[in-house]
Amino acid sequence: IDPSLDLVAEINRLRRERNAVILAHYYQDGEIQDLADFVGDSLDLSRKAAATDADVIVFCGVRFMGEVAKILSPTKTVLIPDADAGCSLEESCQPETFRAFRERHPDHIAVTYINCSAAIKALSDVIVTSSNAEAILRQLPADRPILFAPDRHLGSYLARISGREMTLWPGSCIIHEQFSERELVKLKVRHPNALVAAHPECPEAVLLHADHVGSTRAILEYVLASDRDEFIIATEQHIIHQMTKAAPHKTFLPAPGADGGCSCSSCPFMALNTLEKIYLCLVNDAPAITVPEPLRLEALKPLEKMLEMSR
Ligand code: 13P
């Protein structure tokens, strides 16, 4: 790429020419969030992808999110800036092992977090995100036990708040897993007025110190609605970009890892996406997400059930 190229201007030109919409998760770099047509959490982004009348969706997030967009909008071209943008939760849950897990628990309802592959979705009864999981669980028959995959921390949080019997898959997110309870308590002592907002992918020891637990959108809404002006944010740190934009007078501190610093709260997969790669994917029409039609139809069922149950 010519280093003198104005990437933002070029991306704007290409998105008009291609009738493309750029969707970005809150975990993307600030410059990507600012460029996007829509920034949201996993549920809102799925809804946008299902409803858009664009011809092309450029999905700035991780691969499974682009895959969800393709499953819901199969006639659109779905481009992702970097095909290597994976997810530790998706990786932890492979179809053969998951199938065996289901077979060992034949009476269970398989409630699966959206952070998984199309193959795992196809083996699930209903998909959830962190913003609708509690509401969906409440609608499921009370006499049936639940199998929850792949995030064990989100699963145990849901079991605690719902009182449901749940068998958990042993996966976790490499970002949320690393927040340190000890360092969080030290930070709270130094900032006694700060409220703690945490994503339910955090371990229980971290959630115990949270004033609010919710999805990225819920965390954002919480800090903006609060009359307090100092917060510790226990999720991927790029969401702080939206917080600072909307409330520049407030202070947002990323939750610390075991070394007391916050480098652990930056997702290396999300960070693979850059303006340059967004430009290139629009020029090359690649990498594009493809999902074989029989698999897409099977994965669509539990996703549609999720959308129905979270209206
Ligand atoms: P939400 O977008 O539902 O807050 O989940 C965050 C996440 O884990 C994205 O991978």
Image: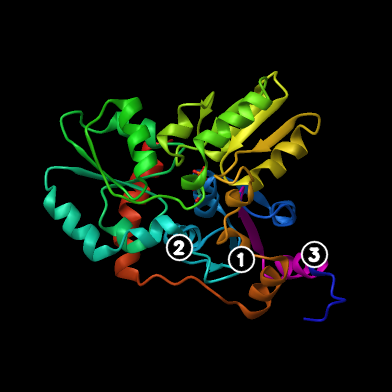
Please name the residue that numbered disc 2 is placed on: 67
Q: Quadrant of residue 91?
A: bottom left
Rendered residue at 60%/30% (across/down): 186
Please name the residue that numbered disc 3 is placed on: 8
Please check the rendered image and state whether residue 13 is part of the magenta-colored stretch, yes or no: yes
Please check the rendered image and state whether residue 82 is part of the magenta-colored stretch, yes or no: no
Q: CA distance from mark 1 to mark 2?
A: 17 Å
* Up/down of 276 relative to 179, above or below: below
Residue 244 image position (x, y, % from top left): 75, 38
| Three-letter code for the amino acid on which mark 2 is drawn | Glu
Which residue of the protein is positioned furthest toward the right in this rendering?
A: 4
Q: Quadrant of residue 309?
A: top left
Bounds of the magenta span? 9-26
Horizontal placement of 24 versus 5: left or right? left
| Three-letter code for the amino acid on which mark 3 is drawn | Val
- Please tell me whether mark 3 sits on a helix, a strand or a loop: helix
* N-terminal label among 3 and 2: 3
Residue 104 image position (x, y, % from top left): 12, 52
